[in-house]
Amino acid sequence: MRCKIHLYGELGTSGEITELLQKGDLHFAFQSPGHLGSYIPEVQVFSIHYLFPTDFKLLEKILRKGPHTYKALQKYYRKHKLELLSIIEEGWQIWTANKPLRKPADFEGITFRVMSSPLLITAYRLYGAYVITVPYGQIYDDLALGRIDAETQPFFAIQEMKFYEVQDYMIKANQLPFIGTFAANHMFIKGLPEDIRDMINDAIEGANEYIFDFEPKLNEKRRQMIMAAKPSMKYIELTDEEINAFKE
């Protein structure tokens, strides 16, 4: 099997990629529940703040080996012409802003960018933010021009996309891990010979093993790279008491 790989942005926005996958114009794609929730409401379970454990091994067990995780979601993917192949964790989502965000009241009056999941939009509105959705590739310019004040990504994305250049604070609130799903067009995967499907599943399992081992190291390295590149950056980890205010 030979695969042609397209990098982010080559084929359109996240929503457009979902539609290409549903039509069969794409065979495989990473689908973030943060965007996919607009199509499959049930995947918004991955967008519920403070639902997931901070214990990494327990989180991995839930996502990779939970007895009901795939079974519960697969029927909803198939209903929308998709096949769920993998669920991965890409790091805790970090708030970036130009002021500290330590309590819900700190969100009042700021324009906060989130993905298009209705549940995410509602969560940040409840904190008091004015919430907008813009394409991932547009975030840097909007931050630099002041069209948005804050956003949330794992460390690796903040570093790769250089969001830290136009933000002064990074805040870890443990509200939500960034969870990605790897999906295929349902009819395409269903039509493959069994031995090819087995080969794909073996490759996915091997990739999952690598990803869950590598992710914590990657994000910590990227955090250190950000702090080295911008020593004035202020990194805040919320206390349990501060986190409880968001849970309430």
Image (cartoon, rainbow, N blue to C red):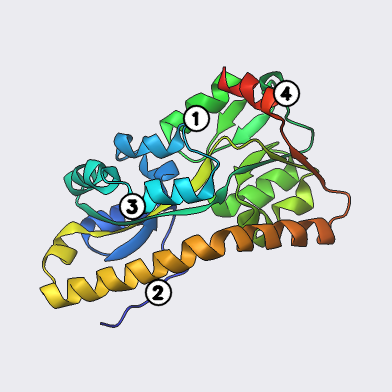
Q: Viewer-proximal residue, 62 or 168?
A: 62
Q: Viewer-proximal residue, 174 or 109?
A: 174
**Location of residue 226 in the rendering, given as x and y in whole percent from the top left corner:** 76, 57
For the point 78% across and 53% down, the residue is 165
Judge from the rendering whether residue 28 lies leftward or rightward of residue 215; answer left or right.
left
Q: Is mark 4 on a helix, strand or loop?
A: helix
Identify residue for label 3. 65
N-terminal-most mark, 2 or 4: 2
N-terminal-most mark, 2 or 3: 2
N-terminal-most mark, 3 or 1: 3
Q: Label 3 to label 4, Cα distance in Å? A: 38 Å
Q: Quadrant of residue 29?
A: bottom left
Identify residue for label 1. 121
Residue density around tag 3, few if under 14, some if 14–19, many if 20 or more, within 10 Å: few
**Location of residue 224 in the rendering, given as x and y in whole percent from the top left corner:** 76, 59
Observer-side mark, 2 or 3, equals 3
Q: Is mark 1 on a helix, strand or loop?
A: helix
Identify residue for label 4. 106
Judge from the rendering whether residue 166 lies leftward or rightward of residue 191; answer left or right.
right
Q: What element carries label 2?
A: loop
Q: Label 2 to label 4, Cα distance in Å? A: 41 Å
